[in-house]
Image (cartoon, rainbow, N blue to C red):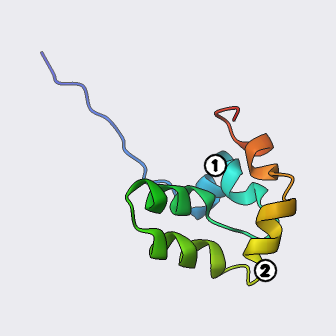
Amino acid sequence: MDKPSFHVVIPDYRYWRQNIKCQTGCPVNTDSRGYVRAIADGDYEKAYWIARMPNPLASICGRICGAPCELACRRGW
């Protein structure tokens, strides 16, 4: 009996942009997943820089953000 064979395709950037919409839902391109992961790992300085790098006004946006990433999230957060 032959073993089944599989064709594996490594996703490219376009795939991620189309299917992981929470990452593209942020109008200032903040990597929310990255900084939440850094906080969970206890690396608060890394979390700060992940949030701050694309957006120098992160503290202001954090207070007034309408969270479009949550609306775009496929997990329904």
Q: Quadrant of the N terminus?
A: top left
Q: Position of residue 37 (x, y in %)?
A: 47, 56
Q: Is residue 40 above or below residue 77?
A: below
- Residue highlighted by disc 2: 57
For residue 34, side relative to residue 54 (left or right): left
Residue name at image x 17 percent, y 24 percent:
3
Secondary element at image label 1:
loop
Distance of mark 2 from mark 1, alpha carbons? 24 Å
Q: Position of residue 48 (x, y in %)?
A: 56, 74
Q: Is residue 58 above or below residue 4?
A: below
Label 1 environment density (alpha carbons within 10 Å; few <14, some 14–19, many ≥20): few
Q: Along the polypeptide, which appears first: circle 2 or circle 1?
A: 1
> In the depicted view, which residue is nearer to us: 39 or 2?
39
Q: Position of residue 24 (x, y in %)?
A: 73, 59
Please tell me the numbered disc located at residue 20. 1
Q: Is residue 71 above or below residue 16?
A: above
Three-letter code, disc 2: Leu
Please tell me the numbered disc located at residue 3. none
Residue name at image x 49 percent, y 54 percent:
11
> In the depicted view, which residue is nearer to us: 30 or 18?
30
Secondary element at image label 2:
loop
Residue name at image x 43 percent, y 53 percent:
40
Which residue is most to the left?
A: 1
> In the depicted view, which residue is nearer to us: 9 or 22?
22
Q: Position of residue 26 (x, y in %)?
A: 77, 60
For residue 20, side relative to residue 28 (left or right): left
Q: Quadrant of the C terminus?
A: top right
Of tags 2 and 1, the one toward the viewer is 2
Three-letter code, disc 1: Ile
Residue name at image x 70 percent, y 32 percent:
76
> In the depicted view, which residue is nearer to us: 15 or 41?
41
